Image (tube, rainbow, N blue to C red):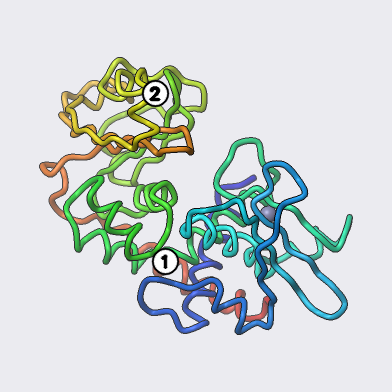
Amino acid sequence: MSKFRLKMSRLKGEQVASQFGFEALPVDPFKIAKDESIVVEAKKPDREGMSGCIVFNDDGVGIIYATHIRSEGFRRFTVAHELGHYFLEGHPEEILKTAPVHFSKAGFTQGHSSIEIEADHFASGLLMPTRLTREALYGAPVGLEGIQHLAGEAETSLTSAAIRAAECAPYPMAVVVSQGDQIAYGFMSESFKRLDRLRFLRKGDPLPYTATRSFNSEEENISSRKSICGSTRLAEWFGGEKTIALEEEIVGLGSYGYTLTVLSSDLLAGDPDEFEDEEEKLVASWTPRFAYGR
Ligand SMILES: [Zn+2]
């Protein structure tokens, strides 16, 4: 799975949002499905862990999302993920090789096939296009508050907003999702990666002995969605030589069972980086190719 393909999947999501006329948040995947004459239904899942599925029939395309999904944000993400299997180049063909139906587990879970990960990145780009995401982040304080603002504007879950925010934050920011004393995954913004020579966090790495680790030792903190703010140093999480102080904002993700940690600093959030320009050039250079796709 190349990083390039993931980026292209995300950009395709952004492009579909714009093609269907969404120039402001929130982007509505239900409306896009309707405009494409795709029938969307809620159904009780007949497979464990299934978030939704897409069906390619002779008489049309249908999307089903699981009724057990209570969060509106995750429903929207699920429908956007299924739209990814419809819009991404090669996905319908790949699915139809085995059956006219594909069952999904949306939401950046580990150990997925490549089309699942690509569909997640598509969904992320569709619901939170780069320009609109950066605008939402500019309109709020640095860190967790910015992510909460983005999740509200984009009508997504806090977790998917956090991942997207870390990908395109205009300032140094890292987000870490953890459970117990282990890291589930972590994302850093481009300018965060440049702070020092850092190591990447991997699934299963032990959490450093910071406020997040003590937060996780109390089950109640996670289930009651408690939120606290501590302070930490860059090197405690990522190694490196420099002494850089960071805010460590922590929030329990409720029944999801995980904890979200946001690492950022007002002091580091000075000049916006040049990420946007590169990104726009890349979108422009790929647009003709997309236009001939589905
Ligand atoms: Zn899928």
Q: Earlier in the sequence, mark 2 or mark 1?
A: 1
Q: Is residue 95 above or below residue 21?
A: above
Instruction: Give the amino acid type for the residue marked by disc 1 in the picture.
Output: Pro
Q: Which residue is mark 2?
A: 219
Q: Position of residue 89 (x, y in %)?
A: 69, 66
Q: Which residue is mark 1?
A: 129
> Would residue 63 appear left or right of 223 to someone viewing this image?
right
Mark 2 and mark 1 in contact? Answer it, CB < 8 Å.
Answer: no
> Would residue 181 appear left or right of 59 to someone viewing this image?
left
Quadrant observed for ligand 1 in the rendered image: bottom right
Q: Residue at x 46, y 20 (%)?
A: 205
Picture quarter containing residue 188?
top left
Label 2 crowd (10 A; few <14 / some 14-19 / many >=20): few
Q: Secondary structure at mark 1?
A: loop
> Would residue 286 appear left or right of 224 to someone viewing this image?
right
Q: Secondary structure at mark 2?
A: helix
Q: The C terminus appears in which quarter of the rendering? A: bottom right
Instruction: Give the amino acid type for the residue marked by disc 2 in the picture.
Output: Glu
Q: The N terminus appears in which quarter of the rendering? A: top right
